[in-house]
Image (cartoon, rainbow, N blue to C red):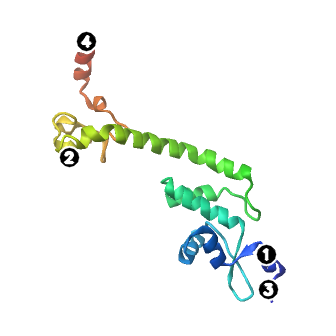
Amino acid sequence: MATPALLTPNLLTIGQLAARTGLSVSAIRFHESRGLVRALRSAGNQRRFARADIRRLSFVLIAQRLGLTLTEIERALATLPEGRAPTRRDWLAISQRIRATLEERIRTLERTRDLLDGCIGCGCLSLGSCALYNPGDRAARAGAGPRFLLGDRPADFDAPTARRKRRSQP
């Protein structure tokens, strides 16, 4: 016999949760395996989810569209209270915590947008051999990856004497 808690209309089957969120049953199982939602089990060992899990899974979908990684999403949802539906204040706290991550992503996208024409527009597609933008592959001194898109500026790699000459010129 099922426990009284499992007879409440506030619990949803996995199929009902899938219909409400637009996620497939297998995606919900995956998110459950990662701890993003937790199912109760009926006497027949069937999954039952709290109505609040609709919001948790909706947050997962939104966060993924915003570019958050699964690890970032897991960290955010781990701050929600156990045993009760999150309040507006709980969700606001998550929003404030991920804001810095989103702001940095926006800055990266803006840098990429602003540098894209100069980087790809020349046609060489090689920062390592670009005589104008990265002569001598000086950006490689800062490490791997697209250094200018990561926030470095070409001037960061100028030799100290080159910086002094430029400053002293009228």
Q: Is residue 40 left or right of residue 139?
A: right
Q: Earlier in the sequence, mark 2 or mark 4?
A: 2
Q: Residue under label 1, please give it.
A: 9
Give the residue pinned by disc 2.
125
Tell me what residue is drawn at x 46 percent, y 45 percent: 105
Mark 1 or 3: the one toward you: 1
Q: Is residue 44 above or below residue 59?
A: below
Which amino acid type corresponds to the residue marked 2 in the rendered image? Leu
Pointer 3 with pointer 4, Cβ within 8 A: no
Mark 2, secondary structure of its residue: loop
The disc placed on residue 37 is none
Q: Give the numbered dot on residue 168.
A: 4
**146 sits to left or right of 137:** right
Mark pair 1, 4: CA separation: 77 Å
Total labels: the figure holds: 4
Q: Position of residue 117 (x, y in %)?
A: 27, 39
Q: Residue at x 61, y 62 (%)?
A: 58
Q: Nearer the viewer, mark 3 or mark 4?
A: 3
- Residue 110 vertical position relative to residue 16 in the rendered view, above or below: above
x and y percentages locating residue 108 in the rendered image? 41, 42
**Element on which disc 3 rests:** loop
| Tag nearer the camera, 1 or 4 | 1
